[in-house]
Image: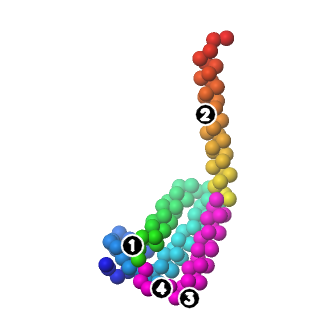
Amino acid sequence: KKNACSKRIECPKFCEGPMMLTQDDVISLYEHVQNITEEMLVAAREKNWSLFEELGAKCTNEVVILKSEEITGVLSSDNIEKKFKLIQSILGNDRAIRDITEPWMKNLEALIGNTSNQKKIERFYNSREF
């Protein structure tokens, strides 16, 4: 396996293949995810859904790296604390994003459901002769 490249976060296309993440790489990835989720929250507040989707894809890629790469050694107590605080911030951003998007999604589901029901009723009445 290659040694972890600290540039991986910024240039994944140049650092391909399985890698070993250092403690600093792990913390950098969590910081990057936290920054992305902050940007996603701003995009959601501004209802900029194309940017929100783009950032969501970036966030997913970073999380995949965190889940799939091996970490060299055990995190130090300082890095465990940093990681914990970053995860708390990420989860807080996620909750705030859900508070914005869930009502919108429920409204969308209701609109789609009403349209579907309306079409069913129209088909029913159009198939009958009165």
Residue count near mark 1 (Cα–Cα under 10 Å), binned few <14, some 14–19, many ≥20: few
**Residue 87 location, quadrant:** bottom right
For the residues labelled 4 and 1, say whether their Cβ atoms are less than 8 Å apart.
Answer: no
Q: Return the residue at label 2.
A: 116
Residue 100 location in percent, x, y? 66, 57
Q: Earlier along the polypeptide chain: callout 2 or callout 4?
A: 4
Q: Return the residue at label 4.
A: 74
Q: Earlier along the polypeptide chain: callout 1 or callout 2?
A: 1
Left/right placement of residue 107 relative to residue 13 reads right
Residue drawn at (56%, 83%) of the image? 80
Residue drawn at (64%, 30%) of the image? 118
Q: Return the residue at label 1.
A: 11
The stretch in magenta equals 71-98
Task: Tell me the mark number nearer the camera, choosing from 3 and 2.
Answer: 3
Q: Residue 46: in sight, yes or no?
A: no
Residue count near mark 2 (Cα–Cα under 10 Å), binned few <14, some 14–19, many ≥20: few
Q: Secondary structure at mark 3?
A: helix
Residue count near mark 3 (Cα–Cα under 10 Å), binned few <14, some 14–19, many ≥20: few
- Distance between the alpha carbons at the discs numbered 2 and 4: 54 Å
**Residue 14 covered by magenta stretch:** no
Task: Tell me the mark number nearer the camera, choosing from 1 and 2.
Answer: 2
Q: Which residue is at the far front?
A: 74
- Distance between the alpha carbons at the discs numbered 4 and 3: 9 Å
Q: Amino acid at mark 1?
A: Cys
Q: Amino acid at mark 2?
A: Ser
- Distance between the alpha carbons at the discs numbered 1 and 2: 46 Å
- Distance between the alpha carbons at the discs numbered 4 and 1: 25 Å
Q: Return the residue at label 3.
A: 77
Q: Amino acid at mark 4?
A: Val
